[in-house]
């Protein structure tokens, strides 16, 4: 049986960084609505990702964001130690 590791980890998303790399130089202009509109992902999901408050990410929205950002899910979500 695998032993539980006492080191806590959390998932961090890189949506802001990837959006900037995509060419969204001004995130104030290129905000939640714009990303949701262009990607087809839910506005609520994009908003919560931008604020790093999302607890559940629907696979459909993940796929749409990855297509829009031209990335893999592992590029958007990172597992890090707290």
Image (tube, rainbow, N blue to C red):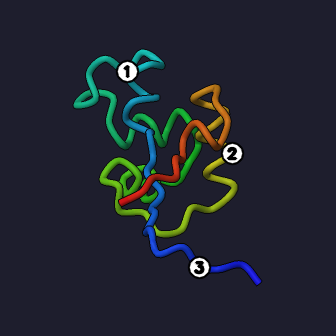
Question: Of label 1 and label 2, which has the lower sequence position?
Answer: 1
Between circles 1 and 3, the one closer to the viewer is: 3
**Marks 3 and 2, Cα distance to the nearest angstrom?**
31 Å
- Could you say which quadrant of the image residue 69 lies in? top right
- Of residues 3 and 40, the one drawn nearer to the viewer in this rendering: 3
In the displayed structure, does residue 28 sit left or right of residue 2?
left
Taking the spot 54% from the left edge, 47% from the top edge, the residue there is 77
**Marks 1 and 3, Cα distance to the nearest angstrom?**
41 Å
Taking the spot 56% from the left edge, 48% from the top edge, the residue there is 41
Q: Position of residue 33 (x, y in %)?
A: 38, 42
Q: Position of residue 32 (x, y in %)?
A: 36, 43
What crowding class fits label 2: few (fewer than 14 Cα within 10 Å), some (14-19), or many (20 or more)? some
| Mark 1–mark 3 CB contact (< 8 Å) | no
- Callout 3: helix, strand or loop? loop
Which image quadrant: the N terminus? Answer: bottom right
Taking the spot 61% from the left edge, 52% from the top edge, the residue there is 61
Question: Of label 1 and label 3, which has the lower sequence position?
Answer: 3
What crowding class fits label 3: few (fewer than 14 Cα within 10 Å), some (14-19), or many (20 or more)? few
Looking at the image, residue 28 lies above or below residue 59: above
In the displayed structure, does residue 36 sit left or right of residue 52?
right
Labelled disc at residue 63: 2
Residue ID for mark 1: 24
Q: Position of residue 27 (x, y in %)?
A: 28, 29
Residue ID for mark 3: 4
| Mark 3–mark 2 CB contact (< 8 Å) | no
| Mark 1–mark 2 CB contact (< 8 Å) | no
Labelled disc at residue 77: none
- Of residues 6 and 64, the one drawn nearer to the viewer in this rendering: 6
In the displayed structure, does residue 36 sit left or right of residue 26?
right
Number of marks: 3
């Amino acid at each position: 049986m695998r032993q539980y590791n006492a080191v806590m980890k959390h998932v961090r998303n890189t949506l802001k960084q990837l959006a900037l790399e995509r060419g969204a130089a001004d995130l104030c202009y290129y905000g939640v609505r714009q990303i949701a509109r262009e990607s087809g992902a839910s506005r609520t999901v994009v908003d919560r990702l931008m604020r790093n408050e999302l607890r559940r990410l629907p696979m459909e929205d993940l796929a749409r964001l990855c297509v829009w950002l031209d990335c893999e899910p592992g590029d958007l979500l990172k597992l890090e130690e707290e």
